[in-house]
Amino acid sequence: MGTHVTIFMFIDALGWDVVERYGFLSDFPYRRPVSMQFGYSSTAIPTILTGAKPSEHGHLSLFAYSPDHSPFKGLGRLGRFLRPTSFWERGRVRNVMTRIARKIYGFTGYFNLYSVPFNRIGLMDYMEKDDIFAEGGLTPCANLRDVLKAKKIPYHMSDWRASEEENLAAAETALTEGKVEFMFIYTAALDAMRHDHSPEDTEIRDKLKWYESRIHRLMEAAKANFGDFTFTVVSDHGMTDLTKMVDLKKAVESTGLVFNEDYAACYDSTLFRVHYLKDGAKDAIHKAVNEKTFPGHWLNGDELVKYGIDFTDHRYGDEIFIVDPGVQIVPSDLCRKSLHGMHGYDPMHANSLAAVVSTAEIPDYVHEVRDYFRMMTERMKN
Ligand SMILES: [Zn+2]
């Protein structure tokens, strides 16, 4: 029997919106909305695992324009021969290509080709080649596992590649064995569900009920095998229903500027990230994409600093245009069609807010997703 175990459980897309709506884990006395890390889960998870800003740990989006460092040069060349392209752009074919590419390139991190067009893939670098949960996976920043190992704390951490069911079962086994002092449980299935449903849909309500029952089971196991425990649920963002689609790509391409000569760009679902390669490109793009032509705005310097995305090497673009909450860039490099819901908007927007729910008092300093790391390390009993 262990004396104490500190349990953290991450639920992707458990926004404050649904925590409030459904009174999620109403038996937990402490809860708080938390401002989202600007970006996506690919930004938030490295931030949670290190407590560092994206400009420090280096992660924002999964793809970045970088012709010299692209591991996909061969794939790009292949793409030119694959005509008609429609077959190769199909989802199922993409999934097969993703699996093959992951093997060929030896990526150990999360990898998906998504919808990056084959005529551009050879110019793109992939930013999560390594397993960010592994020891040294976020060097130069120390990640959660590095800290646990350095402090010699017996721990259990979920395998992000496994299903939620498997991760919850593994966590229960670890609790039953009674040997760990710290746990980080990872669950991510709610995100996909929320991309397809509104918060009021029964699918979402039932899924939250399911999480509650599984959490209570884990708590029973903790009670039976430990003298004392704390259980804290954390999330990375909420979700905003679709209100409008915008074809930013078409507007940019209609400027007549040539990709990879005058400019380069990545189209995320809510962000247009542009690199200016020649004089005059910026003016032409600002003429096509601005607050009057599209619902959104160019991020200013203060926002870049505030969101921790002021990358000195501009690896994610010289400038970023973000669309307003509810708007989706369609097509994007991540998705060829619109989704029912999306995230990646203004971090302070009500539907963007993440949540922390705990059996123990939440420290005053926890205001944004980045603060979870300090809370986790302070709750390690060493
Ligand atoms: Zn998502």
Image (cartoon, helix red, strand yellow):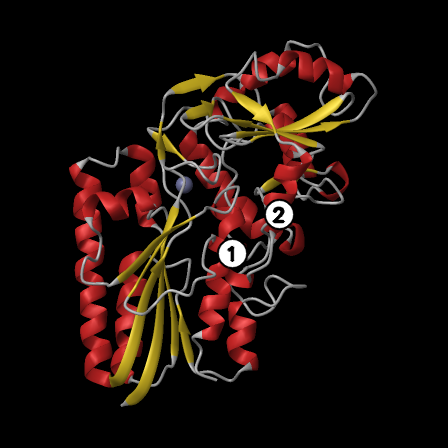
Residue in the image at 45% along x and 47% along y: 35
Residue in the image at 46% along x and 29% along y: 335
Mark 2 near mark 1, Cβ–Cβ under 8 Å? yes
- What residue is disc 2 on? 308
Q: Residue furthest front?
A: 364
**Which residue is nearer to you in this view: 60 or 240?**
240
* Residue 68 image point, x, y percent: 77, 40
Q: Earlier in the sequence, mark 2 or mark 1?
A: 2
Residue in the image at 47% along x and 37% along y: 344
Image height of 258 relative to 41, above or below: above
Q: Is residue 140 left or right of residue 50?
A: right
* Residue 347 image point, x, y percent: 48, 40
Residue 62 lies in what quarter of the image?
A: top right
Element carrying mark 2: loop
Q: Is residue 64 visible to the viewer in this orientation of the structure?
A: no
Image height of 158 relative to 342, above or below: below
Q: Residues within 10 Å of mark 2 (few under 14, many from 20)?
A: some
Mark carried by residue 370: 1
Q: Is residue 337 visible to the viewer in this orientation of the structure?
A: yes
Q: Quadrant of the N terminus?
A: bottom left
Kind of residue at disc 2: Gly
Q: Residues within 10 Å of mark 1 (few under 14, many from 20)?
A: many
Image height of 60 relative to 367, above or below: above
Q: Residue furthest right?
A: 279
Kind of residue at disc 1: Arg
Q: CA distance from mark 2 to mark 1?
A: 10 Å
**Which residue is nearer to you in this view: 198 or 21?**
21
